[in-house]
Each structure stands twice: as C-alpha cells, then as structure tokens.
Image (cartoon, rainbow, N blue to C red):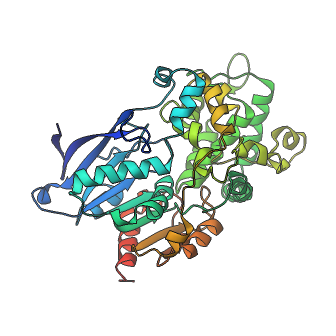
Amino acid sequence: MSVSYRQPGVVLTDRRFTVPLDHADPGGETIGLYAREVVASEKADQDLPWLLYLQGGPGFGANRFVGRPAWLGRALEEYRVLLLDQRGTGHSTPANRQTLPLRGGPAEQAGYLAHFRADSIVRDCELIRRQVTGGAPWTVLGQSFGGFCTVTYLSTAPEGLAAALITGGLPALDAHADDVYRAAYPRMERKVAAHYARYPRDVDRVRRIADHLLHHEVTLPNGYRLTVEAFQTLGILLGGGEGSHRLHHLLEEAFVPTPHGPALSDAFQEETQSLLSYAGHPLYALVHEAVYGQGGRATAWAAERVRAEFPQFDAAKTLAGDGPLLLTGETVHPWMFDTDPALRPLRDTAELLAARTDWPPLYDSARLAANEVPVAAAIYHDDLYVDTAHSLRTARAIRGLRTWVTDEFEHDGVRSGGPRVLDRLLALTRDEV
C-alpha cells in the first residue's frame, strides 16, 4: 500500500516493491525495495513521463530531499521522479553489520552481496519500471556509480530507456580495478597539490596531525581508530566543489591546548569520525572494488596493492623529510575493517569478496556500439573519483553519446549546479545544443 504526503511544492509517495535476490532464479528468495515518488504539487494529477534517479556510491540510499532543491526542481518541470534506494541501501533491505549475520557466516554473506552490483540493480529497475510506468520506457539520471549502472542499463535493457543522462559516471568498460587505481593516485596527488597551493598553511597542519598520530594512539568517540593512513583518506573531500574549503576548515581547528599538552580537539574528532565512518553506508566499503570486477580476475584489494607503486603517499617516509604529506581519495583498504567499528564484524566477508573471481560482465561493447537510446554525459575535467580519460574512451564507444566536458564543476556538479547540469544534458539528448 502506497502512502502519500506533502512537502513544500511537492507531493511524495512511498513505493515498495518485491524483487528476486538472484534474477537468474526468479522463483527463489526475494528482497524488498523502496523508492520515493516525487511530483510537483501543481502537476500531481497530470500524466507525466517518468525520470528514475540512480544515486552514486555504491552503498548510498537516494537523496532525502526537502522540497525542490538542486537538480530535482528542474526535473519536476516535466517529469514525475522516482528516487530509488538501490538494493541494500536506505529502506531497501539494508545490508550492514547488524543485518548481514542473518544470512549466516562470512561465506553466506559474501555470496549474498555478490548480487548487489550494477547488473542486479538494473534488473531491479526493469521490474519496477513495468509496475510504475505500465511498460513505457523512462529517462534515467545516473550520478557517479549511478552512471555506471546506467551504462549497464544501456548494455542489457536499452528498450527500457527513453533517454539516459549521466553525470560524473562513465566507467571504463574493460579496465581492471588495478587500472582504475593506477589512474587515480596521480589525480589524488594533483588535487592535494592544488589544495596546498590554495591553503599553504595546511601543509604544516597536515604534517603536524600526521606526526601526532604516528606517536599517539587516537580513538575517536565512536570507537574509530584514527591512524595516519585513515587520516590521509580525508583527501576524499577534494573531489567535491566545496571540498577543499571544508578540509581547510577542519584542519584549522585540529588542536587545542590541554594540561597534558596539545591534543586533537573534540570538534576535529567529531567531524572526522562523521567523514570516515562507514556506519551509514557499509556497502560502499564492502562492494566498492567489486563494481570493477570482470574478466575472471579478483580485485584483491587493488587500491591497497597499487598504492605501493606510489611511494610518495607513504606518510612515515614523508615525515622523515620536510615535504608535504599527500592525502588519498576514493579508495578502500583492508585496514579499514580494523579501524572502523561498523566494518570490523565484516572483515572476513570483505576478504572473500576481494578474492572472488567469477564476476559476470557488466557491459556489452557490441550493444553499446549499436546504441539507439539518446544519451548525454557530463564529464568533469580531472574528476577525482572517475578518470576523465577512461570516461572519454567510453563515450566514444557508445554510439550517439554526446558529452559535455567541463571544469566548472567537480564530481558533485549535479548537486551544486543541478538545474544547469540537468538542463544541459536534456538539451543534448534532444539535439538542442
């Protein structure tokens, strides 16, 4: 039974669905999915085309908007929007340290989570579409990992798409996770250098914090063990439009004087734990590298292995000299399953996923080369999270795809510049630009 309610300028309806856990076994176990339908109040009784929004991640539920902010306001001018909590996130049979033990031990949990990649998400979307639209194709807007899912959608079920809009989410079609991170670490280095150029005093602040962590055991209020390597991952902020400024403000208030000498401030610790904890999105850590799994090869903690090829990220070596300490970005490491209390019970499960080799293909190059769906993609120049060169190569491989390459926005451009970004992509799919 669906329930509707109102917020400023919109009517919201809770929608719930039942789908197979394994779409290859439609008569087997099922899981529940949740999505929020959004329509402009003045259009609530109109017959409108549908736009499905696929959130970035993996592991994040759809945005909980209030009213018509960001890109949503532009979409509601002509669409009825469906904000889907992808399987395992939000209200869609959440997968975390509390729920996964219901599956059994690590082997059962890993086998279960093998069904939480883009291929399963797209099949979910197709079952939902038939119920929501009565069979009519819909437009999909995919942000980041949602864009990865959209390319899988184009590969497996293009008949379900009226148009595809991708923001910061064109994946490499055939790259191994190792290739993804070999391209990522140099981007991280460039982003950190740009931050230090903007805020030169942060060079000393970062070194001082890292040195403190090398010589003191620090446990954050939520039980997170703050190591130097964990601190370095705060560089993930540098991929957002306001991220450099947010990082600077965090570093500014790192230390306070105490009777026992300088200590990391409560304010710094509180903000840092909110940035580093995976309690609200554990799937991000569990299946992050699995989203690149293809070709019969294990991902095998690719970000950790490839990092060793870039010794300039070694904190101890850097602190032995006088150079700036580098931060890292969107990487998941095995030690996170020791430092983060939300992940510790899932360490063995993560190891099994990292060792898995039987990942099915996610993309169909031949089908993409023959694509007939109108597709437009915003590619953010020097995107921290998704390699620009990989995205451009994929853009050339999808027939008819039109790109908008810009350095006006960072990876979160669909949020910070939402109406303009969405308007530009819609125009591209309609040959208006």
Q: Residue at x 52, y 74 (%)?
A: 369
Q: Position of residue 405 (x, y in %)?
A: 54, 73
Q: Quadrant of the N terminus?
A: top left
Among all residues in the image, which is located at the extreme left? 45
Q: Residue at x 77, y 48 (%)?
A: 306
Among all residues in the image, which is located at the extreme top? 259
Q: Residue at x 20, y 55 (%)?
A: 39
Q: Quadrant of residue 47?
A: bottom left
Q: Is residue 329 left or right of residue 45?
A: right
The residue nearer to you, when weighing 231 against 254, is 231
Q: Is residue 274 left or right of residue 121?
A: right
* Residue 248 seen in the current view: no
Q: Quadrant of residue 182?
A: bottom right
Q: Above or below — where is 58 with respect to 146?
A: above
Q: Is residue 431 left or right of residue 347?
A: left
Q: Quadrant of the C terminus?
A: bottom left
The residue nearer to you, when weighing 173 against 210, is 173
Q: Position of residue 211 (x, y in %)?
A: 79, 33
Q: Position of residue 107 (x, y in %)?
A: 60, 27
* Residue 115 seen in the current view: yes
Q: Quadrant of residue 278?
A: top right
